[in-house]
Image (cartoon, rainbow, N blue to C red):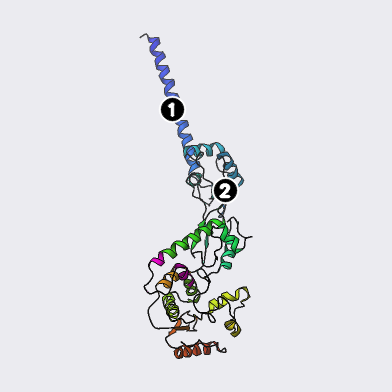
Amino acid sequence: MSPGSKRGCRFVLIVLFLLLAIAAACGAWLWQRYTGFSDQSIAGLQAGDSVVVASGDSFPSVLRKLRAAGVEQGSDLEWRVLARRLQVASSLKVGEYALDPGITPRDLLLNMRDGKVINYRITIVEGWNIRQLRAAINAATPLLHETNQLDDAALMKLLGHPGQHPEGRFLPETYVYSRGDSDVDVLKRAYEAMEKALAEVWKTRASELPLKSPEEALILASIIEKETGLASERPQIAGVFARRLKLGMKLQTDPTVIYGIGSGYDGNIRRRDLLTDTPYNTYTRTGLTPTPIAMPGLDALRAAVNPAPGDALFFVALGNGSGSHIFTATLGEHNAAVARYLQQLRRPPLPEEEPLQ
């Protein structure tokens, strides 16, 4: 090889080396810029900020929503490169995403890719009646409301159970939903949860239970739920009602009378209320009420099918604010307990229980 050729080769090698060094330096600079952007907390966000990815949104449209929400960090190119690298652009999940203070672009895009949306909760409280449940559902946000203009019959038809009374049909528990879900979604889940719970507890029912069907167990559980002030007493209260049903005694329980009064109930039960016959007045009618009177929880369902043993046929509130009761086996003992209770309250006595026939 001639000297000139050698010098030419050295020159080419030097140029290649310099180009590689420049490329490496640029790559390092770009990588540093990229990682600094993707892992740096987004500035200016407030608790409660969010962005909604709608059906059909492209990543550029989502990026515009982020800008509108106050996200100024990074260039559009940086966001697009990061989205492509994380395989987000083609995998966006519909939903509402939190823009919490401290979140990074990487975490935000991964949430959108994996569908980690904001969850909301609504709790159905044990002992609520259908009016209270529907009021809570109607007030829940951002739940879509499809049932607020429907009466109870139309509601049950929409849920796929035409002709069924809605009382007691929805299991008290906390239900999670996200933006875009409707009240129908939540109510269907609560209905199915009650159906499943009732079927499971019915399988565990005690022998010689004075109940003919899961439906009767649901009704009794609702009465137990409304009578119980202390959770641990549910089986004892269930035992009293079970023994009364076996003996053909009236249940004589105030919550059923209150349910029969309906919206006219003003917080007081009067003598005329106990004597006015309605399908729900267990002072004037024997047996269970025609429907549940509230939404019973799982513990009330279990108590209804497995009542505590014993001989008590009566109970009355202890009157000390604890929610507990005095359980007695005879009418005389019960009347004495009622007298003590009323003396504490300093008010005229209510009509006595019927004597055992």
Q: Which residues are magenta?
A: 200-219
State the image coordinates of residue 185 (x, y, percent, origin top left).
Answer: 53, 56
List the residue tagged with mark 1.
21
Question: Could you tell me the amino acid type at mark 1?
Answer: Ala
Q: Quadrant of the N terminus?
A: top left
Q: Viewer-nearest of labels 2 and 1? A: 2
| Chain-order first, disc 2 or disc 1 | 1
Q: Which residue is mark 2?
A: 52
Q: Quadrant of residue 143?
A: bottom right
- Foreground residue among 351 and 248: 248
Q: Is residue 183 visible?
A: no
Is residue 184 at all visible to an observer of this figure?
yes
Left or right placement of residue 92 versus residue 327 in this view: right
Q: Which mark is residue 73?
A: none
Three-letter code, disc 2? Val
Q: Residue 206: within the magenta? A: yes
Residue at far top of view: 2
The residue lying toward the viewer, choosing from 261 and 355, is 355
The image shows residue 266 at horizontal and vertical percentages of 62, 78
Taking the spot 57% from the left edge, 48% from the top edge, the residue there is: 52
Looking at the rendering, which quadrant does residue 145 occupy? Answer: bottom right
Q: Residue 239: give x, y in percent of width and height.
A: 42, 78
